[in-house]
Image (spheres, grey):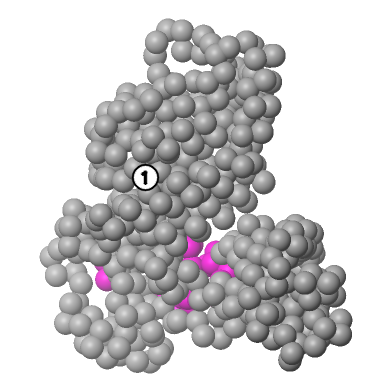
Amino acid sequence: MVRLFSHYIPFGTLLQVALDACLLFAAILLGVSLNGNGVAASLVNIVFPALLFALVMTATISVLGLYRRDAPHAFHDVVARVLMAFLIGFPLSYAIFQLLPLCQPCRDSLGVTVLLGLSGVLASRAVLLRASPAGILARRVLVLGTGAQAAEVERMLDSDRSGGLRLIGFYPLESGEVAVSAGRVMSAALSIGDTVRRHDIDEIIVAVHERRGGILPLRQMLDCKLAGVQVTDLSSFFERFHGQVRIESLRASWLIYGEGFRQGLLRNAVKRAFDLLACLALSVIAIPVMAITALAILIESGGPVFYRQERVGQGGRVFDVIKFRSMRNDAEADGKPRWAAAVDARITRVGRVIRRTRIDELPQIFNVLAGDMSFVGPRPERPFFVNMLCEQVPFYNARHSVKPGITGWAQVRYQYGASVDDAIEKLQYDLYYVKNHTLFLDLVVLLRTVRVVLSGEGAH
């Protein structure tokens, strides 16, 4: 894993992005050359359009989920998604080249360029599916512990397809039931240092629930660290690997003394500028869609079109969120707040469509412009549920240290929440965002949001 702007990205993903970008950049140069426009004479004019084409196409490929850790590995699935990416990216690139005056050679040769780029990307994917370059450079991992937490680490590493970490085995420290694969448990006859040297370990993950009573051999672990072996606690592993700050392995001291959770005037100013630009860009598409949606709601069930509801924002301040009404007017006639169910009779026919496509969220643009919300951030919850969750879930209030968002890290990583257990799971993603939020992470969330909207994942 590589930490880029406070966000962890699998090394294999970075290699794939870099390789695709280089292939697409080269496709422009070769396409212009084959089209007889003379690359050498106009190289300066071609470099910027080539970079722009590579950026548009890699962003499109990302939206279709080909850079995800759980991206499809069946070649026919990969081919289908790559073809879809080029079908979307071709008209986008042509429109951009049409608007920019220096892009005529690239526009004239775009057909050849797309064929070259498509061939190169498909060929590279075929090679990577057989032998991942990240697997060659995989870090060899030793897990301390054999209990339930170690078993969860085992499940996560075994399901990882990026090939960045290779689980070598488990070193037993606790007595009791062994929850991991018995064949992977190493002998405790050797010290941790000797085990690390014998198996050429690059990283140690500490997966022990109880750390008191001298169960951890701190001296041996220190010797390993001084020898260049990375030692990672469970909280940091989940944060790096799964994009979560896990509640069960979290301690207040880690939140206080650890990195992240930074706020400041510059960061807030950059965030606000990003929000305004994002709202301006979205409004171009959103205004016609919002007009049609408002008309559809009026035709089906009359007014009101918009639905206002109290939500808790930054610092615990209560504000009214604005959404399109997707339920009947008497949805909470008894005055008792309740979560939406998977199959909810209160939702109208138009409501089902706009919820599935996330169109019901569009009026929150006005909340962003008013400064109550951000474009990216934790989902704002109702005061009733916030009060309940603060009593039942540790550190729940930490999510209110930033502005809530129209979309967020938890929304694109987890399905719609409708219970306390779901709220805990989403909080773990929210804490990761609060700890590591940067402009780069906001852009990552936006790309994933586009994919979620197009695929309908997590619709409720």
Indicate the position of residue 368 as horizontal and vertical percent values: 42, 38
Indicate the position of residue 138 as horizontal and vertical percent values: 50, 82
Q: Is residue 89 visible?
A: no
Asked if residue 103 lies left or right of residue 388, the reply is right
Q: Is residue 173 visible?
A: yes
Answer with the quarter of the image where residue 122 lies: bottom right
- Tell me, yes or no, whether the highlighted magenta stretch contains residue 158: yes
User: Height in image: 80 above or below 214?
Assistant: above
Answer with the quarter of the image where residue 282 lies: top right
Q: Residue at x 47, y 40 (%)?
A: 406
User: Height in image: 278 above or below 18?
Assistant: above
Q: Which residues are magenta?
A: 155-175
Asked if residue 298 lies left or right of residue 202, the reply is right
Residue position marked by numbered label 1 in the rendering: 427
Q: Amino acid at mark 1?
A: Leu
Q: Quadrant of the N terminus?
A: bottom left
